[in-house]
Amino acid sequence: MVAAKTFTLLVGAYGSSIFSLLFDPSSPNLTVLGTSDSDLAGLAKTRQVAVMDYSSGTGAFIPLGDDLLTLDEANAQKITFDATVSHPHQAVEVGDEVIIPDLGADKIWRLTQSPNAQGAVPNWEIRGFVEQPAGSGPRHIAVDNGIIYTLHELASTLSSQTLPPLAYGAPSETISSFSILPPGANGSTFGAAELIIDTKRSLLYASNRNLAASPDPRGDTIAIFSYNTTGHLTPVDQFFTGLNQIRAMAHGGPDNQYIAAAGLTGGGLAVFEKTGNSLTERARLPAGSIDKPASFVWL
């Protein structure tokens, strides 16, 4: 009998702590392996780190040293956005661009490096933007086949829009837009949070956050949408997770067949397996084991 492959997940939590978890698909329980104090940063461009500051409305591109571990802060570039209110929330590398959803400005900024950039020293410039509905609050994005998919925190919607090459100067066009809220959610206060795109399965997974004082006992849902090559969205499932306020969600495994998700305020952490157009729970770590989980990395 061949032993099932096990996986290690890193969990970032509020308070600058990182926990390591063991996920064994043959066990219904997640196991804490250890913890350390550190910070997580996301690479936005080769040999650079992009950092977006939601509170100040600014961002920075910081070159990496030769060891790819140290930050060359002396050559960092600070970015500001031309908006009355700016809350940049993410940076996604798409070809030669870095694309940044701005929850405060209701825009998705498009940046490229200046032709005058010197080596690894960042020299990013805003070249354009994709307009979003007023008050929608674009939080997270994903891009596939020239289509940008945007999760709006304040409107709790998922939309698809064209992403024309910057050189064409053509405006983006909206293809689809759907609410991600589960049926019967009237009267609750929601804020959309995380977004995963699975380009192999042509599925998008969007997490709801029920901010009500008395949340649904079934927990928050992950809204699942299929999409086609032209960017048209179709809602296919609302999966109740038993988690409250999902602020951490990432897929992994050799075929990206698993999704790890965590409740910021309750429900603990769970790993779900993608089964058709839905999900099936495979393992869980009870609430209280990790305080306020906020991010995942699959190893």
Image (tube, rainbow, N blue to C red):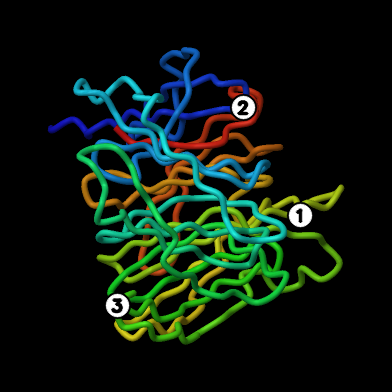
- Disc on the earlier residue, 3 or 1: 3
Mark 1, residue position:
216
Q: Amino acid at mark 2?
A: Tyr
* Helix, strand or loop status at disc 1: loop
Mark 3, residue position:
167
Dot 2: within a 10 Å radius of its alpha carbon, few (fewer than 14), some, or many (20 or more) residues? some
Q: Is residue 136 left or right of residue 279?
A: right
Q: Is residue 276 left or right of residue 236?
A: left
Mark 3 near mark 1, Cβ–Cβ under 8 Å? no
Mark number displayed over residue 178: none
The x and y percentages for residue 203 are: 38, 68
Dot 3: within a 10 Å radius of its alpha carbon, few (fewer than 14), some, or many (20 or more) residues? few
Q: Is residue 114 left or right of residue 205?
A: left
The alpha-carbon separation of the residues under discs 1 and 2 comes to 24 Å
Q: Nearer the viewer, residue 210 or 24?
A: 210
Q: Residue at x 64, y 52 (%)?
A: 87
Q: Is residue 229 left or right of residue 60?
A: left
The x and y percentages for residue 130 are: 50, 73
The x and y percentages for residue 197 are: 38, 61
Q: Amino acid at mark 1?
A: Asp
The x and y percentages for residue 13 are: 57, 27
Q: Amino acid at mark 3?
A: Ala
Q: Residue at x 51, y 65 (%)?
A: 108
The alpha-carbon separation of the residues under discs 2 and 3 comes to 41 Å
Which quadrant holds residue 8? top left
Q: Residue at x 32, y 20 (%)?
A: 70
- Disc on the earlier residue, 1 or 2: 2
Mark 2, residue position:
14
Which quadrant holds residue 97? bottom left
Q: From the viewer's perspective, is the residue at label 2 or at label 3 nearer?
A: 3
Compared to residue 174, the image places residue 108 above or below, namely above
